[in-house]
Amino acid sequence: MRDEDTYADLTALFTAEDREQEAKPFVDQVMGRIRAQARMRKLLLAVTGLGGALLAASQLPKLLADSVGLDSSLTTSILQAQEDVSALASANPLWLGIGAVVMLSLMAVAAMERA
Amino acid sequence: MLTDPDLAADAARGNDSAFAELVRRHQARVRGMSRRLTASSGDADDIAQATFLTAWQKIGTYAGGTFAAWICTICYREFLQVRRRQRPEIEFDETAEIIPFDRTMADTGDKMDLSRALARLPEAQRICVTLCVAASLSHREAAEATGWPLGTIKSHVTRGVAALRKHLAADQVA
């Protein structure tokens, strides 16, 4: 006789007790949390992707001006706008702080979300 | 009907509906197990939820075998984490005697008898009975989940079952 056979009656009692619990609210709760995490992950990916794309785009005018000779007035105005934004950010360190907090938050979410 | 390993493989590919089906199939076992391992129903629900969230994150590491054993192992580890956070000063003691459960008076009848009888067991026996008898893990699976030697598991289960029967019989007489 297997060990398990000696307590099959007790196992049946425990199983009957477990079956009394309603499954749906629990499953919904767990899946709700999982889907919320997935949404957060997608948002994070989108924000990071957008940040990367903006960073790449910011380098594009200079690259195009150097390599294919894009109209210099256009590239100059874009570069001027970039410089204005940098000057604004460095003039008020609060923006740099906000940016750093946002980046740290995103990194923390990324690290926590899928360890 | 898809088997647990099939569903787990689908879930590992990001199919959350497949994982929802796994949660539905195993929730009773995991919730029952966490309720029996812990002292409070609040902790039990938290542990059960944390178990499935961890399982979702680690579903890619499930390498076949009994899904019930895999999920119960995660549940046991979540229980240990909660236990360490709550009572960091108390070392686990396999020979410890009764650690009473905080049961409400709303529990009645067979359920109360079973819970009360289980609560009277020493902690190591209660863990082994919960894993092997209530959650239907084999002795070997319980040994892998807890990290205890197979002989220790067998011994705790045998003694625990005997004590459980004794307590249940005493409750019925009383």
Image (tube, coloured by chain):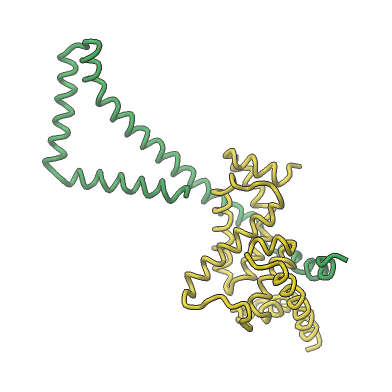
Chain colours: A green, B yellow
> In the image, is residue A59 above or below residue B115?
above
The residue sitting at 58% across, 54% down in the picture is B52
User: To which quarter of the image does residue B156 belong?
Assistant: bottom right
The quarter in which the N terminus of chain A is drawn is bottom right
Q: Position of residue B142 (x, y in %)?
A: 69, 63
Q: Position of residue B88 (x, y in %)?
A: 47, 74
- Say if residue B18 shows up in the picture: yes
Q: Position of residue B28 (x, y in %)?
A: 68, 60
The residue sitting at 64% across, 54% down in the picture is A24
A88 sits to left or right of B26: left
Query: In terms of depth relative to the viewer, which is nearer, A44 or B111?
Result: A44
User: To which quarter of the image does residue B134 belong?
Assistant: bottom right
The residue sitting at 69% across, 52% down in the picture is B67
A73 sits to left or right of B157: left
- Say if residue A17 shows up in the picture: no
Q: Position of residue B119 (x, y in %)?
A: 66, 78
Query: In terms of depth relative to the viewer, which is nearer, B169 or B9?
Result: B9
Label tally: 0
Query: In terms of depth relative to the viewer, which is nearer, A76 or B102?
Result: A76
Q: Residue furthest right?
A: A1
B162 sits to left or right of B16: right
> In the image, is residue B131 above or below residue A56?
below
Q: Residue furthest left?
A: A91
Q: Residue furthest bottom?
A: B174
User: To which quarter of the image does residue A41 belong?
Assistant: top left
> In the image, is residue A49 above or below residue B110?
above
